[in-house]
Structures are given as C-alpha cells and as structure tokens.
Amino acid sequence: MKTFITILIAVLLSSPLFCQQQQAVPLDNAEIVFNGAYIVIANKANLVIQNSSPKALTIKKGGGIISEGANNNVLWNIGNDSNYSIPFVSTDLTAIPVSFNASNGVGSGAFTLSTYSGEPDWQNSDYLPPGVANVNMNGKDNSKHLIDRFWKIAPNAYTKNPRLTNLIFNYRDLEWSEDSNSIKEKNLAAQNWNGTKWLAPVGTDKTSANYVTVNAVSNYFAWWALADTAFALSLQKDIAIQKTEYVLMNQMTTDKQSIYLAQNFPNPYKSTTTISYSLPVKYSSAKIIITDKNGSTLKQINLSGNKGSINVDAATLSSGAYQYSLYIDGRLIDTKQMIISK
C-alpha cells in the first residue's frame, strides 16, 4: 500500500517518478491513474504491474510512461481481458501507446514491454536492440526506410501464450519524416525479428492518426520495427529461399512421413525436457535453434535422419520462457515455447 500511495502522490502532483537500476516496483492489484504525471524508467529498471486488469494503467488527463531504452521494461501480468494499453510517452511528451487485445492465454505469466528511439540518430543500425543482428535489405543498411524506433513485446512464463489481436503501434511524425529518412508513411507496416532475420511485413498504417495496426500476431518474438514495405527488411533473404520452400512444400504433399516439431515434454520442466521432430526424406540441412525472450540464440542443434528427438538440459539456463524453432534447408518450419521452472 505504501508503494501505491507514493505513486498516487506523484500522479496527483504531476511530477515524474523514477524507476532506477535493479529496482522492481511491484503493484499488486493497484491501479495507476495518470493525471498529467510521468513515470520515468531508467538504467535497466523494471516497473512491475501485477494487477492483470486492463484498468491497472489508466490515463485520466495526460501523462504516461517514459522508458526510451531497450532494457527499461514494463512487466505486466497480462490476463485475458479485452484490451490492454501501455501508455508509453516519448521524451518530448508525445503519447505513443502500444495496445492490443489479449485472449485464450493459459497459466500465470507476464509481458515484457518497452520502446525506444535513437533520437537524434536516424540510423537504426547504430542502436540495434539486444539480439538483433541488422536492419539490412539485400545485405545493405536499410535504416533510411525504417522508422526511428523499436518496440519489445515478449510474453514470459505462460503455459500457453495469450492470443494477441488488434496490435497497434503509435509513432511520432518526426520518427519517419526525419531528413535522412526516405519513407512513404502510407507504406509503413510492422516487421518482427525471429532470431535470425526479419519476418515479412504485416499490418496497415493510418497516416491521419500515426499508427500501424496488426490484425493478429502469429509469433512471439520480442522485437518489432516499422518499415516502408517497398523496402522491407531482409527482403533478399526471403527471395533466396523461395525455391527451397517450394521443394519442401512439394515434398510434404508426396512423402508419407509428415514434417513436424513437437511440443517439448515435460513443459514446464526443471532439469531436462525432450523435443521430438520429423524431417522429410530428402533435405540438405536441419537444425533446432533455441532463443531467449530477446531473440538471442542460446543453442543450435544440428539434426540428422528423418525422425528423432533431442534432450535439452536446463542446467545452464535460468527460469523463464524460451523459444525453439525447426529450420530445414534454411526455412523456418515451426516455433514453439518451452518454460523452465526451477
């Protein structure tokens, strides 16, 4: 209750509240009502919202959360209510909220959320998020076709991640119209880094309101960016694997043996879990890649044969949610989540 009173006073007085490094501020069942005040998260701090109600963060008369750092996070125990809005605000106090509908989640988990720009640096390659290798197109820096901001949306510790729909990214005009950028605002769409490359653009832009809407999220990789679809990130790599995809799809329809990546068992687990898989009769290479919530590669296991399983030891991993993906001949086949609970 003391923490809630402190925050409430900060809101009423319209003064900033700072969350500093190594300090998590837990808010069990509390609601933060912003009345013109701002919470500033700095130095890799976490603002922990344990109230799963969408009303846990409410804007009354302006205000919001200034994070502006890759590791300055809001950790929110998102449930299965209709709509959640994270009231992010830029350093110039422009409201740039992230919102989405959440449903069908299983288990007690939380989302890690953050956003930051490289202001005044327009070149996104100078301030890449942790685990993101590049913002390239055809092997060349594509920063000038990319809005000057990144977003993190990462679920953790759910047995089954909530389904996200109507995901909305708000942005500032100057983040796309900066002189060194070359962007047609109407072409903006969202791209997601899967640990090895940027996925194909999704969503549509509403130029009159400065936001991009993604109808549904089909994966749960952490980092997002907004790019001009005429110059989509990693476009050349996607074109290069089209022939491989065609061969695999053709083979999947003719082989008696199916291609699949099984859910690890047990899940969650404390020490060791097993992942089963089935591969096509003919292929050049196959591997399973394990990544953390930021998309950083932790392990890569090369596969052989047509059917088998691997064991994953949790000895060197901490508690939390991880992704594992099956790649065949460079093509991403499937991704699933495993949870370590020590």
Image (cartoon, rainbow, N blue to C red):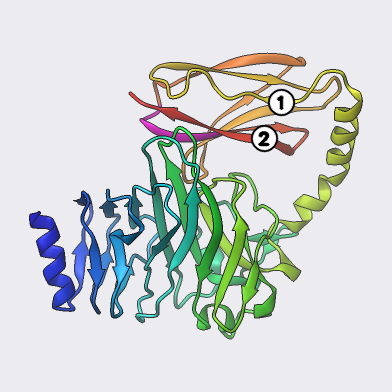
In-front residue for pair 80/172: 80
Give yes or no for contact between labels 2 and 1 (Cβ–Cβ under 8 Å). yes
State the CA–CA distance, disc 2 to disc 1.
8 Å
Provide residue 208's location: percent of width, then percent of height: 58, 84
Query: Which residue type carries mark 2?
Result: Asp
Determine whether, in the image, residue 133 is placed left or right of residue 65: right
The residue depicted at 39 percent of the width and 63 percent of the height is 86
Q: Is residue 261 above or below residue 3?
A: above
Determine whether, in the image, residue 304 is placed left or right of residue 17: right
Provide residue 183's location: percent of width, then percent of height: 66, 78
Q: Quadrant of the C terminus?
A: top left
The residue depicted at 38 percent of the width and 40 percent of the height is 109
Query: Which residue type carries mark 1?
Result: Tyr
Determine whether, in the image, residue 290 is placed left or right of residue 83: right
The residue depicted at 28 percent of the width and 80 percent of the height is 61
* Residue 292, magenta (yes or no): no
**In the rendered image, which residue does mark 2 sit on?**
334
How crowded is the residue under tag 2: few (<14 C-alpha within 10 Å), some, or many (20+)? some
* Figure quadrant of residue 214: bottom right
Whether residue 315 is visible: yes
* Residue 322, magenta (yes or no): yes
How crowded is the residue under tag 1: few (<14 C-alpha within 10 Å), some, or many (20+)? some
* Figure quadrant of residue 31: bottom left
Whether residue 182 is visible: no
The residue depicted at 43 percent of the width and 63 percent of the height is 115
Q: Is residue 264 above or below residue 141?
A: above
**In the rendered image, which residue does mark 1 sit on?**
260
Range of residues picked out in magenta: 317-323
Provide residue 339's location: percent of width, then percent of height: 44, 29
Q: Quadrant of the N terminus?
A: bottom left
| Furthest-front residue in this view | 82
